[in-house]
Image (cartoon, helix red, strand yellow):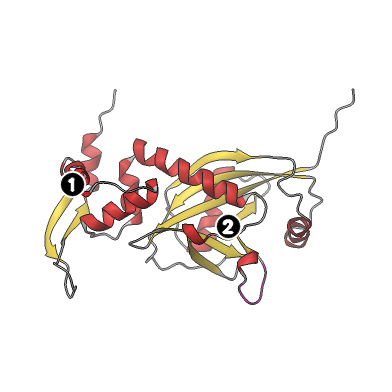
Amino acid sequence: MKANFIHTYVSVDCVVFGFDDNQLNILLVQRKEGKADSKDLKLPGSLIYDEEDVDDAAHRVLYDLTGIKKMSLKQFRCFASPDRASNPDDRKWLDKAYQPNINRLITVAYLSLCKVDRKLTNVSKYKSSKWCPLSDVPQLPFDHNKIVDESLAEIRKWVEVEPSIVFELLPNKFTISQLHRLYEAIYNKKIDIRNFHKKIAAMSYVIALSEKQRDVAHRAARYYKFDKVIYNKRKTTIQ
């Protein structure tokens, strides 16, 4: 039987998580010019360039969108359903944005972390970008909602393997309450604060500072910091 080969393109899509003290957010871009519309929001992504490594393509997308050269980046899955670009509006946008004859679009999905309060410098083709609370993510094009859902499951696995990555979502100095709320947001469940304090006390790389909160209505909480040097010393390698 004659093989039915298709004209296939490969893209990257990036799920960038941020934390704003109470909830997780993801970075979305507006795919059409003009007034912002929730129907036009999507995950940042791009077709890969000729002779470009797929990891380099993901770093390019994030740099163009944020101006940050070094971000934690994790490739977690390939999405290749034959109908992922079957929606007429999505195909119309693809034709306008890239103008190739795309029969099939396969995307390699990446997970990244960024501090919400970090200044972002967007030089990409997307003129508008915004942080969107995970609980308020609208219906996105292609299969981007599915990618977001699976990225949240992936970030939980990532935290289990590399606990230090959670601190990339926090300010340089933070309170235990902030860290507690972040863990609750990641796992989407309530975590007993007493047991959490015990867990943090066992983390030698979470260092208490002499500084406390100022000008707050409640009792001022102590600030802490993540010590990367101490964290790295915990690791052992087999030579």
**Residue 200, position in %: x, y?**
20, 45
Q: Name the residue type under label 1.
A: Arg
Q: Residue furthest right?
A: 1
Inspect the magenta stretch and tell me whether residue 178 lies in it: no
Instruction: Answer whether residue 135 is visible to the viewer in this image.
Output: yes
Which residue is drawn at the image coordinates 26% and 59% (left, top)?
172
Q: Nearer the viewer, residue 204 or 132?
A: 132
Q: Secondary structure at mark 1?
A: helix
Instruction: Answer whether residue 26 is visible to the viewer in this image.
Output: no
Judge from the rendering whether residue 222 lies leftward or rightward of residue 10; answer left or right. Answer: left
Judge from the rendering whether residue 237 lies leftward or rightward of residue 88; answer left or right. Answer: left
- Work out whether mark 1 precedes mark 2 in sequence or the reverse, and give the earlier one: 2
Which of the numbered marks, if any, corresponds to residue 194? 1
Judge from the rendering whether residue 6 lies leftward or rightward of residue 128; answer left or right. Answer: right
Q: Name the residue type under label 2.
A: Pro
Which residue is drawn at the image coordinates 59% and 47% (left, top)?
146
